[in-house]
Amino acid sequence: MFTDTDAHEVSSLLENTQDAYSRKDLDDSIVYAKRIQDGMLLKEKHLHRIFPESFIYTRARNIVSGDFYWFTRIGNKTIIAVADCTGHGIPGALMSILGINLLNQIVIEEHNTDPAFILHRLDHKVNKAFSYTSEIVEEHFAKEYHDGMDIALCCIDNDTHIMKFAGAYRPVYYVRDGEMHEMRGTRRPIGDTGSEAIFSNYTLHLEKGDNIYMCSDGYASQFGYLIDKKFSSGKMKELLLDISNKPFAQQKTLLEKTFMNWKLQREQTDDVLVMGFQV
């Protein structure tokens, strides 16, 4: 006899089976989204063609990432950027795709190479893309969240060996003669509608052998498994300085090893992206 208990068990089994298929469909979709996102990014080997000594260390928190890097050459200039978008996972990944497309428009199509102006244009385009927010989102929600990114962007003149840098809440680090230096960006993210976009250029006369590092805040924000605190930007700068005299492939390995030893079994806090190159 088919009892009520049997019916309940069958119903539960069907629900669990449906949930399993739904999760698999979602997982498959996210994995495919990662393929699309990866396809939009140049590979590390392309960076090696510009800077033979270089690396890109990236580790997404949830398969797809809200961090992205971007670089290109325009004439005698190399433009390179590292960005940390609002959120992580799918929302962050969608924002990263928007950021990549906008940088392609601003730099490659419009032929802009001035970092501060590029960030100004990027800020304008991001705000324009999300201008609908005030119309369809409740006022208190719109104030609590903003769609945008933190970004560090450099333009290197390969003839004069001058690097111009502009940043939106992200710095650039450089190591010269065994000393760590930092150039800080403007304390304003891309996409902030609450203040006027004013980004400034900072100039560095490069010397042969200078190591340049750009990163999101994910590495420094990671909480430790044995020590319940963040890795910290100060500790990260110390690490970059300590490994700066090693080949860049080895630097990447050491960055990953240090990160994994710090995190151990703890959940990853945020997306991680670190880029380094020698001029």
Image (tube, rainbow, N blue to C red):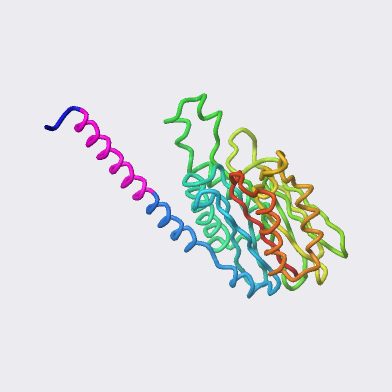
Rendering quarter of residue 257: bottom right
Residue 6: in magenta span = yes
- Rendered location of residue 136, percent (x, y): 42, 31
- Left or right of 116: which side holds 110? left
- Rendered location of residue 244, percent (x, y): 79, 64
| Quarter of the image with the C terminus in it | bottom right
Q: Main secondary structure of the magenta part?
A: helix
- Rendered location of residue 166, percent (x, y): 70, 52
State which region is magenta. 5-26
Looking at the image, is 250 positioned above or below residue 20? below
| Quarter of the image with the N terminus in it | top left
In depth, the one of 84 and 156 nearer the eye is 84
Q: Residue at x 71, y 66 (%)?
A: 277
Q: Residue at x 53, y 40 (%)?
A: 147
In depth, the one of 261 and 113 nearer the eye is 261
Q: Residue at x 25, y 40 (%)?
A: 14
In depth, the one of 279 and 216 nearer the eye is 216
In the rendered image, the residue lying farthest to the front is 1
Residue 96: in magenta span = no
Rendering quarter of residue 72: bottom right
Looking at the image, is 266 positioned above or below residue 5? below
- Left or right of 279: which side holds 194? left
Q: Residue at x 59, y 72 (%)?
A: 45
In depth, the one of 147 and 271 nearer the eye is 271
